[in-house]
Image (cartoon, helix red, strand yellow):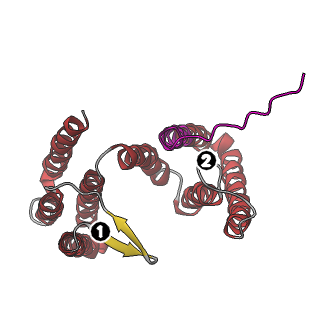
Amino acid sequence: MAKTNVGKKPISKEEYTTNKVLTVFSVCLLGVLVLMMLQRLLDYPSTWATGMLAVKVLMGIGAIGVICAVILLGLELSGKRDASRRIICGRNVLIVSLVLVLCMWAINYLGTAQPIKLLYVLLPVLAVYYLVYHSYAPEFFVIAADCGVAIGLIWLVRRALESANFTWMAYAAVGAAVVLTLVQIICAWTLRGKGGSFTFRGRKVESHFSRNAYTMLTVTPLVMTVLVAAMLFVPAYILVAMGIAAAYLFITAVYYTVKLM
């Protein structure tokens, strides 16, 4: 009996998105586990050298990953390899490799305590933001980014004011918040004037913003900038400012979650 050749069913867009989100969460979880291992090695003088060797090996693996990613990108751009709906493609490998190199560089050259503690927070946050990007309305991703940046700047202002040599960083952080707010408001209302679409590389792209998106994209950065600027005058209330930003994010998250139902 002749064998029947049945073509492989192409993966759907929804399934591909789900696989990407699960992969990102798995990679971030693996990253946290690696950080735990490195911290355990670096906490003890007897194993500190082994820990630093592991850091350099991981940095080398990241560098090799960057080279492989460049090769993959070359093949994909030349049409010799199809990157559509592939988890392992040049862009994804490049992003993961660069993150690995930057993380290990920070531990190797900036110290072992603060960078690891910061990465414990950043990796899960990146995974959550990736989920938000693919699961929620586009404007909520921007709102979540505004709140996240504001919380980071609030923390930076407080730390800068505690050090006499880096007070200027507090004012720079407030200035950055103001600039980002102006840029976002200008972009939002320019986009509204164009009917929610813009042209990128000669192709029309729809933003898919909802009716109230432009108001939210105006109010949110203004509120967050006020919270950041308030730290210059009442730095002792850092937890209150962070709590307000987190509460604002939680309320908008509930609102957009209900809209998904």
Q: Residue furthest right?
A: 1
SS type, badge 1? strand
> Between 30 and 182, which is closer to the camera in this rendering?
182
- Viewport quadrant of the N terminus: top right
N-terminal of the pair, mark 1 or mark 2, is 2
Depth check, mark 1 against mark 2: the one in front is 1
User: Residue 101's image quarter?
Assistant: bottom right
Residue 13 belongs to the span the image colors magenta? yes
Q: Which residue is mark 2?
A: 87
Name the residue: 68% across, 52% down: 58
- Kindly identify the amino acid type of the residue bearing the numbered disc 1: Ser
Q: Which mark is residue 197?
A: 1
User: Residue 193's image quarter?
Assistant: bottom left
Instruction: State the image coordinates of residue 62 (x, y, percent, origin top left).
Output: 67, 57
Q: Residue furthest top?
A: 1
> Between 39 and 178, which is closer to the camera in this rendering?
178
- Kindly identify the amino acid type of the residue bearing the numbered disc 2: Ile
Q: Which residues are magenta?
A: 1-28
- Judged left or right of residue 132, residue 247 is left
Instruction: State the image coordinates of residue 70 (x, y, percent, origin top left).
Output: 69, 67
Q: Gap between marks 1 and 2, in whole Å?
A: 28 Å
- Judged left or right of residue 137, residue 39 is right
Q: In this rendering, is residue 113 above or below 101?
A: above
Residue 120 belongs to the span the image colors magenta? no
